[in-house]
Image (cartoon, rainbow, N blue to C red):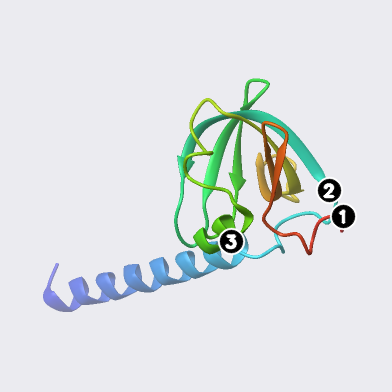
């Protein structure tokens, strides 16, 4: 491979990664990927990833692995949802919206309930 071919391949690979990254971000963030119907699930936290652009919980719900998108750090803090509350082994109930594709076990939390206490991440959306 000469220098010109190498540069061409590198440029195409970079462009492809940019398109893939942008489409993944657009598909995932916001609410467009989720249904409009309320969805509730209870499970045990098996993994936690906090930070930007949002946090994620992995739940074991009756033997099924679910990914739950929670809020951005500021949103979690505003709701009173702290890192100390989101420990592996903790049982949580999630109220929110699930992915439109029923094959995906992914949901976006509007409310997280732990030990009977509600942490409303999107109070303006609850009941919608």
Which mark is first along the chain, 1 or 2? 2
The reply to whether dot 3 and dot 1 touch (C-beta < 8 Å) is no
| Disc 2 packing (10 Å; few <14; some 14–19; many ≥20) | few
The reply to whether dot 2 and dot 1 touch (C-beta < 8 Å) is yes
Residue extending furthest toward the left: 2
Q: CA–CA distance between discs 2 and 1?
A: 8 Å
Name the side, left or right, on which 84 lies relative to 106: left
Residue beneath label 3, please? 75
Which mark is first along the chain, 3 or 2? 2
Name the side, left or right, on which 51 lies relative to 68: left
- What is the x, y in percent for residue 52? 46, 61
Q: Work out whether 39 lies above or below 16.
A: above
Which mark is first along the chain, 1 or 3? 3
- What is the x, y in percent for residue 90? 56, 28
Q: Work out whether 58 lies above or below 37.
A: above
Quadrant of the image occupied by residue 44: top right
Q: Work out whether 76 lies above or below 103.
A: below
- What is the x, y in percent for residue 64? 64, 26
Task: Judge depth for marks 2 and 3 and give the one in front.
Answer: 3
Residue beneath label 1, please? 127
What kind of element bears circle 2?
Answer: loop
Q: Which mark is residue 38?
A: 2
């Amino acid at each position: 491979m000469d220098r010109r071919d190498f540069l061409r391949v590198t440029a195409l690979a970079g462009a492809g990664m940019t398109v893939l990254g942008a489409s993944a971000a657009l598909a995932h963030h916001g609410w467009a990927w989720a249904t409009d119907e309320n969805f509730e699930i209870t499970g045990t936290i098996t993994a936690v990833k906090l930070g930007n652009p949002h946090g994620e919980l992995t739940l074991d719900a009756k033997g099924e692995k679910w990914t739950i998108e929670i809020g951005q750090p500021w949103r979690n803090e505003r709701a009173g949802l702290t890192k100390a509350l989101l420990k592996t082994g903790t049982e949580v109930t999630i109220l929110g919206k699930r992915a439109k594709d029923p094959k995906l076990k992914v949901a976006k939390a509007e409310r997280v309930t732990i030990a009977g206490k509600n942490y409303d991440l999107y109070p303006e959306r609850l009941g919608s």
